[in-house]
Structure formats: structure tokens, C-alpha cells
């Protein structure tokens, strides 16, 4: 028998009339092991205090049967980043919920393109490794601290991933020089090796792009949405 990880909640309210401006509030829908995170709508459901605390949300996701999370870009960049960070820590994949507009490319061609990208990225990494090692040494000397940082990007089929970069501070001469020649993007060759992004084709969108455009080209939604949906029942589901 499964039990809820969220404390007992008694009162329901209309989210369009109350708490609409709450930073962490959103509508949750449950579909075949997938959690859909949407903007508030004409739906009555409990207020979830865990949505205001990253630590609590991470714990809920870790102890839930959620296989992946789909989030609507209409929620705004702040909530997208909040949920992406929590899903990353909980080791749950997160996708943008976007309309399926284009057909997926032919699967054999897609696999061939991924193989070519992987080989090219590996060769480029070997060639760039002396320069990357030199940059790491210079960063240790002139800009101590963490070497890498990750920025959220929208990948294939709307999947969110962290694009790796060298951490640069534009206030330093080294940081300005690395940014000028895009040397801070060299670690993204590792993203290509992992299949997160491609060396060719359109660039990956940022979360800001996703919110502003709200319709991303050349990306297809992960699954087809059923006509019938079911609200997440907190008293019977482990979340």
C-alpha cells in the first residue's frame, strides 16, 4: 500500500481566484507514470507547500513513481529553472511540454547523424585537449573556484539538459578573452558525446527562449497527450 509523502491536506481552492501569484503554484496532472506541470487553471486541488521548497520537492520526486516530468513553458523561466534543478537532483528527466508540430527524422538517418557527431566530437576533444588543459591551469591561477558551470538548454524532443561551459568572470582579462573567442564553450563537446546536442543543425534553445517563443521549432513532444486526463490523487499516489 502506497502512502503520500506530502502531509494531509484538507482544503481545496480555486487556483484561478486565489494564490494565483504564488511562486510555486501550478497544476499537477498524472498520466501513466508521467507528471505534467501546468499553469493554474479552472481546477480545484490542494495547495502543495512542497512546491515552494526545492528540498521538499526533491524528496517528493525521489520517493515517487514518476518516470519523467513534463512542464509547460508558460509557467515562466523562474519555475522552469526551479523544477529543472529539483528534477536534476532527484535524478528524474524533465521535458518541456510543447506541441508536436514536426515529424521526427528518419530513425536510421538520425542514428547515423548521432554517430557522426560523436566521432567528430571525440576527435575535436583530442585536438582541443591541450588548449583545454592550458585554460584549466590559467583559470586555477587567475580565477580560482569551480572550473565548470552548466546552463539549462532545450534539447531533442524538448528534453532539458545542462550545457557545460568553462566558468568565466568577464571582469578578468582571461574571462573576457575566453568569452570573446567562445573558448568557454569547449566543454560542450562532452554534451555532443552524450547525445544532448548536435554539432550541426539549429542551436539549442535557452529557457528564456522557450518562455518567450512558447513554440519551439524542430522539436517534437515526447508523447501524445490523452484526451482523458486524471488529476494526481495525493492520498493514493506516492509523491
Image (tube, rainbow, N blue to C red):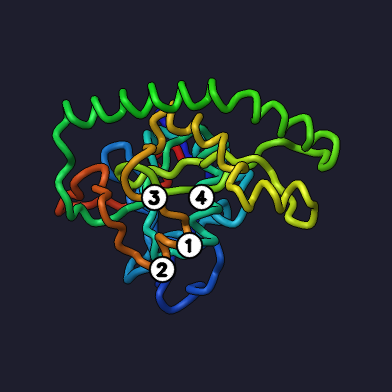
Q: Secondary structure at mark 4?
A: helix
Q: Nearer the viewer, residue 45 or 120?
A: 120
Structural crowding at the residue carrying mark 4, measured as other residues with C-alpha within 10 Å and reported as few (<14), some (14–19) or many (≥20): many
Of the numbered discs in the image, which one, if any, rests on residue 83?
4
Are the residues at dot 4 and dot 1 in contact (C-beta closer than 8 Å)? no
**Residue at 34 percent of width and 69 percent of height:** 41
- Residue 195, horizontal then vertical, whole percent: 39, 30
Of the numbered discs in the image, which one, if any, rests on residue 212?
2
Q: Nearer the viewer, residue 205 or 109?
A: 109
Kindly identify which residue carries mark 1.
208
**Residue at 37 percent of width and 37 percent of height:** 198
Are the residues at dot 3 and dot 4 in contact (C-beta closer than 8 Å)? no
Structural crowding at the residue carrying mark 2, measured as other residues with C-alpha within 10 Å and reported as few (<14), some (14–19) or many (≥20): some
Structural crowding at the residue carrying mark 3, measured as other residues with C-alpha within 10 Å and reported as few (<14), some (14–19) or many (≥20): few
Nearer to us of marks 3 and 2 is 3
Are the residues at dot 4 and dot 2 in contact (C-beta closer than 8 Å)? no
**How far apart, in angstroms, are the residues tagged by discs 3 and 2?**
16 Å
- Residue 58, horizontal then vertical, whole percent: 56, 41
**How far apart, in angstroms, are the residues tagged by discs 3 and 1?**
14 Å
In this view, 63 is above or below 54: above
Q: Is residue 98 left or right of residue 49?
A: left
Q: Which comes sooner in the sequence, label 3 or label 2?
A: 3
Q: Secondary structure at mark 3?
A: loop
Q: Nearer the viewer, residue 184 or 81?
A: 184
- Residue 129, horizontal then vertical, whole percent: 61, 24
Q: Which comes sooner in the sequence, label 3 or label 4?
A: 4
Kindly identify which residue carries mark 3.
203
Amino acid at each position: 500500500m502506497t502512502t503520500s509523502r506530502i502531509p494531509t491536506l484538507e482544503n481545496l481552492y480555486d487556483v484561478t481566484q486565489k494564490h494565483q501569484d504564488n511562486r510555486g503554484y501550478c497544476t499537477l496532472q498524472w498520466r501513466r507514470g508521467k507528471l505534467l506541470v501546468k499553469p493554474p487553471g479552472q481546477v480545484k486541488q490542494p495547495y502543495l507547500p512542497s512546491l515552494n521548497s526545492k528540498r521538499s520537492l526533491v524528496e517528493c520526486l525521489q520517493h515517487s513513481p514518476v518516470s519523467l516530468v513534463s512542464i509547460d513553458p508558460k509557467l515562466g523561466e523562474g519555475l522552469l529553472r526551479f523544477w529543472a534543478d529539483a528534477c536534476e537532483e532527484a535524478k528524474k528527466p524533465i521535458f518541456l511540454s510543447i506541441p508536436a508540430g514536426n515529424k521526427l527524422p528518419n530513425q536510421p538517418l538520425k542514428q547515423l547523424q548521432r554517430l557522426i557527431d560523436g566521432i567528430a566530437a571525440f576527435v575535436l576533444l583530442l585536438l582541443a585537449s591541450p588548449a583545454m588543459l592550458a585554460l584549466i591551469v590559467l583559470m586555477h591561477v587567475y580565477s580560482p573556484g569551480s572550473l565548470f558551470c552548466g546552463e539549462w538548454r532545450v534539447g531533442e524532443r524538448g528534453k532539458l539538459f545542462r550545457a557545460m561551459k568553462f566558468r568565466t568572470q568577464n571582469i578578468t582579462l582571461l574571462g573576457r578573452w575566453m568569452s570573446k573567442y567562445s573558448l568557454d564553450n569547449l566543454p560542450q563537446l562532452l554534451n555532443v558525446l552524450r547525445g544532448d546536442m548536435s554539432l550541426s543543425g539549429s542551436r539549442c534553445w535557452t529557457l528564456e527562449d522557450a518562455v518567450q517563443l512558447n513554440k519551439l521549432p524542430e522539436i517534437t513532444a515526447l508523447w501524445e497527450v490523452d484526451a482523458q486526463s486524471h488529476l494526481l490523487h495525493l492520498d493514493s499516489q506516492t509523491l
